[in-house]
Amino acid sequence: MVHLFARDTIYRLASVALLVLLSPCKLGLTESPPFTIITTTNIIADTARSIAGTIPGTAAETEGGTGIVITPLMREGVDPHTYKPSPGDLRALSQASLILFNGLHLEGKMADVFEKLSKRQPVVAVTDSIPQDRLRSTSTIAVAHDPHVWFDVSLWILASERIRDALSEYNPAHKAGYHSRFAALRERLIALDLWCASELRTIPQDSRLLVTSHDAFGYFGAAYDIEVLGVQGVSTDSEASLRDINNLVRTLSMRRIPAVFIETSVSPKMVEALVEGARAQGHAISIGGTLFSDSLGSPATPEGTYEGMVRQNVTTIKKALSRGK
Ligand code: ZN
């Protein structure tokens, strides 16, 4: 009898052990907390997702099996230059497994926060591996280099590589996946870079002037051979003077530039003033469309991804600057 009872117990224990092996998550025995990545811009979040192989949305990301959750602090249309973190943001940042930010003073109001957090958790500026000689200098004392590197797709490949390395360092269990997905992303970005160049090459020589709300497209202009002027400087954290606006109006009118552009993350007021000013001088200029500058579009739209955003901008610029030529 005793012997039989012992056998029964062994069988029961064995079936419990089997259950544990078959459904470890349901029993909560081998669950580990998700690897949480907080990014500042949604541009960085999208690239990190491409490399991590996750789908936006917390549940989908964890159910996808990667155990990685990527959340941007700044949603679509948010201006990173003037963004101040909320108490909720600070809480999320302090609990993150890894923080990815752009750097080069893009997040001008968050430098102190990153400085403090970096003393006790991984905080990585994704632009810190870009060689100095590939960065654009600015005339602003507070901002030594132009932070808008994502508009030169070849530079964003370098930032993506930095994201891959940060993920590999702080979450090494998935290193092989990060490397293979980065390799695929790199191929797509090389093709995108070539596509941008070939599309923009067709804009007539005398229309190759891109005027937007703020000076976000300097790298874009240098990479794809278009002169660029912003109403505001490389940060939106300063006002344009009336003299700057009048100078721009004169340039646009003299060169008969067909269009100027507004940006999703900046107020359109200044650009509208340019249009009125040019019209007063007898040059009918139009608003060529809205460009995505420091933020992607809404999730689940083509411009809600980095690659889609670049394509959308290039298409808008090419169409508006080729008009009437
Ligand atoms: Zn900007």
Image (spheres, rainbow, N blue to C red):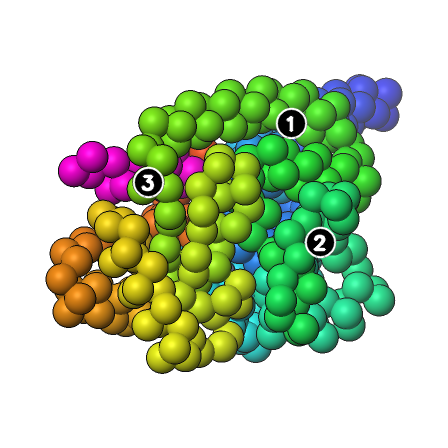
Location of residue 48 by image quarter: top right
Disc 2 CB within 8 Å of nearest ligand 1 atom: no
Question: Which is nearer the N-term, disc 3 or disc 2?
Answer: 2
- Residue 148 is at least partly visible in this image: yes
Question: Element at badge 2?
Answer: strand
The magenta stretch spans which residues?
309-325
Q: Residues within 10 Å of mark 1 (few under 14, many from 20)?
A: many
Question: Which is nearer the N-term, disc 1 or disc 3?
Answer: 1
In the image, which disc is placed on residue 245? none
Question: Element at badge 1?
Answer: helix
Identify the residue at image location x=29%, y=51%: 255
Identify the residue at image location x=15%, y=69%: 280
In the image, which disc is placed on residue 182? 1
User: Label 2 amino acid?
Assistant: Ala
- Residue 28 is at least partly visible in this image: no
Q: Which residue lies under the disc numbered 3?
A: 206
Question: Which is nearer the N-term, disc 1 or disc 2?
Answer: 2
User: Label 1 amino acid?
Assistant: Phe
In the image, which disc is placed on residue 125? 2
Give the mark count. Answer: 3
Marks 1 and 3 close (CB-CB < 8 Å): no
Identify the residue at image location x=20%, y=35%: 325
